[in-house]
Image: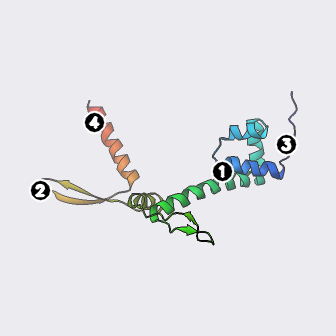
Amino acid sequence: MPRKRKVKFTPEMLKMLENLAAIRLPQEDMATVLGISRPTFQEMLASDETLRQTLNSGRSRSKLKVFKTLYDSAFGREAVYDKNGKLLKAEQPPSERLMMYWCDTQEAFVKASKLEVTGTIGVKEVAQTEEELLAELEELRKLRDDKE
């Protein structure tokens, strides 16, 4: 039975792991880049809090960058200049579509829908989340498929 070699992560390897996690590289590829097998890497992640924190830190850094870009695009950004007045980043006007997307995905807004029915029933107000609407749609599709 082959002996497993003990892998000791240096500060440089930890920094590399954080950077690999930031670009969302799969764990199998991270292990390859770091020169260890995937099972060994997974065992190390399970037993080493520092490795888990490094991995999570890299992923969080990546998310933060994406969220900041999305936020700036949705709500706009003032122009940024250096101390000599040279333009570093142009002004970005707000985007109504991205603002709605942000509110929909990050602020957990509930969409209100109106269901209009002709006849004696009239109009019924329905407030459902997107997940509830999708579940209801799936049920209707199943009923349709059962009739066919």
Marks 1 and 4 sit apart, C-alpha to C-alpha, by 45 Å
Q: Is residue 92 left or right of residue 57?
A: left
Q: Which residue is mark 3?
A: 7
Q: Which residue is mark 2?
A: 120
Q: Is residue 68 above or below residue 30?
A: below
Marks 1 and 3 sit apart, C-alpha to C-alpha, by 22 Å
Question: Residue at the spot x=68%, y=56% of the render?
Answer: 57
Three-letter amino acid code at disc 2?
Thr
Marks 2 and 1 sit apart, C-alpha to C-alpha, by 58 Å
**Badge 4 element:** helix
Q: Quadrant of residue 140?
A: top left
In the rendered image, the quadrant that contains the C terminus is top left
**Badge 1 element:** helix
Q: Quadrant of residue 98?
A: bottom left
Q: Which residue is mark 1?
A: 22
Q: Nearer the viewer, residue 2 or 104?
A: 104
Three-letter amino acid code at disc 4?
Arg
Three-letter amino acid code at disc 3?
Val
Q: Is residue 48 left or right of residue 113?
A: right
**Badge 2 element:** loop
Within 10 angstroms of label 1, few (less than 14), some, or many (20 or more) residues?
A: many
